[in-house]
Structure formats: C-alpha cells, structure tokens
Amino acid sequence: MKGIYLLILRLDADLADFAIGRLGCYCFTAGYYLYVGSAFGSGGITARLAHHQHRPKPRLHWHIDYLREHAALLEVWGIATPARLERCWAHALALTPGLSIPAPGFGASDSDAASHLFYTPGPPARDQLMLALLGCAEQAGATNLAIDIRDYQAAIDR
C-alpha cells in the first residue's frame, strides 16, 4: 500500500536554536506540528509509519526524524492512493488559516512547496485538513482514496 501521510505531533516545550541536519537551526515553539510525507518506496505506508512511530532512532535520516525525537505523535493519517498528492497537500496546508511554516524547506528537498511542516498553537481543525486533502484529490482526479486515521493520544495520556 503506497500513498501519502500526515503526522500530527505535539511539542510540549520550546526548542531554541535546534539543528535539523543540513537544513540548519530553527526555533520550534511548543504547540502542534503537521508533517506531510509520501510513501511510494519499498514497504509503502506501513513501513514509513512504523519508522515514524518509534523513537529514538539509531540514525536520523529525514528532517522529521529530528523533530520527532522531541515531539509526541498524536495522530497519523495514511492515505492509500497512487496519486502523488504530497506536494498539493503541502501547498494547500500552507494556505490554510491558522497554520504557519516554522522552518522553510523542511521535508521539501524534492518538492517545490515552501515546506512540508506546519505549525499551529492549538489542535488542528480536522475539517480543514480533510478539505485540503479532498481538494487535492479532486485536482488530481483521484477517485479511490482509502484514508486510515490512527489516534495515539490515548496512549500518550496514560
């Protein structure tokens, strides 16, 4: 199963002058972070999400791995689709009211999007996220989407 995914993370304490590999140093404010990624390689969504669910990592590979070391994984949206919706979704989220870009270029090495990471001080509105996703699917002509939303909040609250 290949496709795209959205990670919703919560950072409980500010990270000042935090190094993200070769991308550089950024300040990350406590709050919620949304990361859009794709999983079209070997293992697809299952393998990629397994990678993101576990910390610590023996080797930090992607930009999100650096932030993931400090942020709790609250929710994962996995979208099984052959349509390459990652860039469109990143562009749509950049235009979503209430979301901002905390680190230009984050996760966007192979993309024309300004970033694949977004910040909001409070919990993100699911309806806005779904509208952004469905708008991208419509633009791409994707008609068969399987969306799997996994909530990890209960495990964190225990």
Image (cartoon, rainbow, N blue to C red):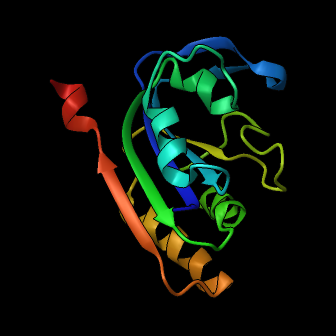
The image shows residue 137, relative to residue 56, as above or below, that is below
Quarter of the figure with the C terminus: top left
The structure residue drawn at horizontal position 34% and vertical position 56%, both measured from the top left corner, is 149
Give 59 or 34, whichever is nearer the viewer.
59
Is any atom of residue 28 visible in this view? Answer: no
Q: Is residue 86 above or below residue 14?
A: below
Q: Looking at the rendering, which quadrant does residue 21 occupy? A: top right
- In the image, taking residue 7 as reference, residue 136 lies left or right, namely right
Whether residue 44 appears in this view of the structure is yes
Direction left: furthest residue? 158
Q: What residue do we see at 84% from left, 56% from top? A: 112
Percent coordinates x, y for residue 145 in the rendering: 47, 76
Q: Residue at x 77, y 38 (%)?
A: 104
Q: How many marks?
A: 0
Q: Residue furthest front?
A: 42
Q: Horizontal and vertical percent for residue 52?
A: 50, 34
* Image height of 155 relative to 40, above or below: above
